[in-house]
Amino acid sequence: MPHTLETGLEALRIVMNALVTFTDAEWTDIASRWQYHYLPKGGHQIVPGQTEEYIYFIISGATRIYHITPKGEDFTLAFSYDNTFTGDYGSFLTRRKATFYNQAVSDCHMLRCNYKDIAELHDKYQKMERWTRLGLEGLLVGMLVRQVEMLSAPAEERFTRLLKQSPHCFQLYSQKHIASYLGIQPETLSRLKRRVASETQDARNVILSGAEGHKTQD
Amino acid sequence: MPHTLETGLEALRIVMNALVTFTDAEWTDIASRWQYHYLPKGGHQIVPGQTEEYIYFIISGATRIYHITPKGEDFTLAFSYDNTFTGDYGSFLTRRKATFYNQAVSDCHMLRCNYKDIAELHDKYQKMERWTRLGLEGLLVGMLVRQVEMLSAPAEERFTRLLKQSPHCFQLYSQKHIASYLGIQPETLSRLKRRVASETQDARNVILSGAEGHKTQD
DNA sequence: ATCAAAACTTGATCTACATCAATGCGCAGC
DNA sequence: GCTGCGCATTGATGTAGATCAAGTTTTGAT
């Protein structure tokens, strides 16, 4: 199962073309700037204090972006997995020190592109500028939705929505991390799981399949 | 005092130039696409179901972007005031129906630019594309900060941070709306105010000056 | 100025969720 | 196989903030 540069670039092109269509010539240039990168399970793609040099495209694997407060509490901001981008966008875009951790929760085969190349592409191709703009728009809309949810929905509802919209997360990530993403304690998530499972059938399927799903490594 | 198109455009140019420098020729074109718009206190700039046709620049005034849940609860997502932009970005950018309200909480003198003109400017000038990209980056970073805060900080800390970082909000907006922005009930904000004021001097100044324009401490 | 409607305050109670604590489970290393 | 450690579960208890209820003050329209 070759997660090579070439197969990665194919996937990347499909994902990028969803927003902007690049010509073959443009694509050749763009593709030439990405390199294959491997991050083993547990490895950190970035930690606070560093400046984010790359933007990453995950060919296969999963990472978790999180923040540690001065008191040592761990909060998950976002999940990234196959065919999505990751990295500390804030640091990458502003060139300031990262404030977040980004850790592989399974072996990650990725492509990455450094800041200088992205900047050159932005200068060279208006389409590239547009691609980034459209991508940021999508991110922004997603964050607004999440913000409304965090403000207005109680824990149980946030949980059931995640269950419905991103069931795969329950296979990829530990309950601890999902709890910290939902803004609750692991104990509370455990109790919610049981309560919801006892009420609905499909919730049970998703939750239980997570239990057997440890084999997901590699 | 004249909140005319011209004085508004001057302010707009200064704000836009902070991210990208436009030539006089470019600016003439850009400026020609904005029009003066007045929204009286209480008026809605947009309500759910409409598609956002404009992006707004506030010359003077203040608005509040909020969401009403099916159960009728009101949640404030963002505040906009002098020299900031407003509108339902999500709807404007994606051309889908708005999900938010945006209401003037004081008389608003604004400039606005419609979707077609913004799109044309994006096509015509790479710099314009970049300006939007950079603006979205800033928004995104701000939202990440807010997300971390909402997850990790308790109500009192969120309150004192807003007090320190945006004290003017306590003059512009009612406690009800500030409470819904902080994710708490108005009663809780009232109690927090008293608790915090009894502890720190400068908090007292900010909070009390909200009650009536300008009052110094005994 | 007068009055009604909102906004804010304050107190009493309630509850969702956190915290603390004990136990069991599953996987990694020896 | 054991052994140890991090993760999940379950129960008992604590608490921040919600909710309910009654005032008071501010606003704004006539």
Image: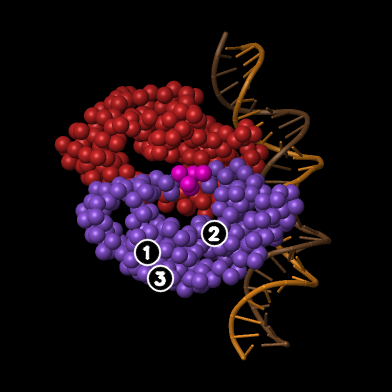
Chain colours: A purple, B red, C orange, D brown
Q: Quadrant of the C terminus of chain B?
A: top right
The residue nearer to you, when weighing B194 against A90, is A90
Q: Is residue B118 visible?
A: yes
Quarter that holds the N terminus of chain B: top left
Where is mark 2, residue-wise?
A: A76
Say if mark 3 contacts mark 2, CB within 8 Å: no
Q: Position of residue D1 (x, y in %)?
A: 72, 87
Query: Which SS class for mark 1?
Result: helix
Locate residue B74, reporting x and y percent: 59, 35
Q: Main secondary structure of the magenta part?
A: helix
Query: Of B164 and B137, which appears nearest the observer?
Result: B137
Identify the disc placed on residue B88.
none
Q: Indicate which label's residue lies in the foreground, 1 or 3.
A: 3
Q: Earlier in the sequence, mark 3 or mark 2?
A: 3
Task: Give left or right: position of A210 versus A53.
Answer: right
* Amino acid on which disc 2 is placed: Thr
Report, in whole angstroms, how far the alpha carbon at label 1 lies from the one at label 3: 9 Å
Q: Amino acid at mark 3?
A: Pro
Boundaries of the magenta span: A141-145
Q: Circle 1: is it few (<14), some (14-19), or many (20+) Cα within 10 Å?
A: many
Q: Secondary structure at mark 2?
A: strand
Q: Report the residue marked by disc 3.
A: A2
Determine the image quadrant of residue B82.
Answer: top left
Label 2 neighbour load within 10 Å: few <14, some 14-19, many 20+:
many
Q: Residues within 10 Å of mark 3 (few under 14, many from 20)?
A: few
Residue at 24% from the left image edge and 40% from the top image edge: B123
**Residue at image location 45% in from the left, 44% down from the top:** A141
Q: Which residue does the numbered mark 1 point to in the structure image?
A: A8
Instruction: Depth check: give the residue in front, B192 or B5.
Output: B5
Percent position of residue A185, x then y: 65, 59
